[in-house]
Amino acid sequence: MAAEPEILAELRRLRARLPQLTGAVAAGRDGLVLAQDAPGVEPDGLSALTATTLAVAIRMTDATGRGDFRELLIRGSEGYVATYAAGRHAVLTLLTQDRVNVGRLHLEGRRAGARIGELVDAHEAAHGRTTRSKAHDPAGGRTPGKASEEPPDDDGTPDHGTTRDTTAGTTARDTSRALATPHTDSTRPLPTRPVGARTSTDN
């Protein structure tokens, strides 16, 4: 993804602002990892679990009329797992120590999620425009159904070789057919008897 270096830089800045942060993964809502800074954690597995949890959270907010998904906070005995919406196409999952200030976690998580969301949404918008342009011009700038112009002959006239050869072949066949057909003069009556044959009146 073109925005991956910028997303990774944002994750590293987040770690500097939040010392209790132990891992951060930015992923698409489909579970595809976009960028990660999570040593000791398998990022693909975490993003897949995030996508599953996100689907349940979205169903929960829909069922209870709470609006669009914004964030999800899970607390374990060793720390927190927090997931924040990052635009329309991505989410940001943060892992922290148990002693983190939750208010500070939300502040920094929401800020980073908004920034990452801008990057991802901009990339998706640009990719969508490129896809639509290709779909609208499948011929790559050429007019569909129009044959390319043939280069001109030495005399400057276009070379329509196929048409010329076909016409010449048809003319040759017509000429051969005319030569093979016996010529009959329709204005001259056919003789009724062989020349020189005698009849009874000649005697």
Image (cartoon, helix red, strand yellow):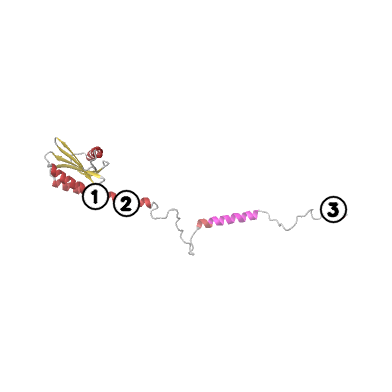
Residue found 37% across the figure and 52% down from its top:
136
Q: Is residue 8 left or right of residue 161?
A: left
Towards the viewer: 44 or 82: 82
Quarter of the figure that contains the C terminus: bottom right
Q: For the residue labelled by badge 2, is the local secondary structure a helix, a strand or a loop?
A: helix
Towards the viewer: 105 or 19: 105
Q: For the residue labelled by badge 3, is the local secondary structure a helix, a strand or a loop?
A: loop
Residue 152 in the image: above or below residue 115: below
Could you tell me how far apart the alpha carbons at marks 3 and 2 are, in whole angstroms? 101 Å
Q: Is residue 184 left or right of residue 80?
A: right
Read off the magenta span.
Answer: 165-180
Residue type indicated by callout 2: Arg
Q: Residue at the left extreme? A: 99
Most frequent secondary structure within the magenta stretch? helix
- From the image, tell me which residue sits under label 1: 119
Q: Residue 76 is drawn in which quadrant?
A: top left
Residue type indicated by callout 3: Thr
Q: Earlier in the sequence, mark 1 or mark 2?
A: 1
Q: Earlier in the sequence, mark 1 or mark 3?
A: 1
Q: For label 1, count other residues whose C-alpha is less than 10 Å away and answer few (under 14), some (14-19) or many (20+).
A: some
- From the image, tell me which residue sits under label 3: 199
- From the image, tell me which residue sits under label 2: 129
Residue found 23% across the figure and 50% down from its top:
118
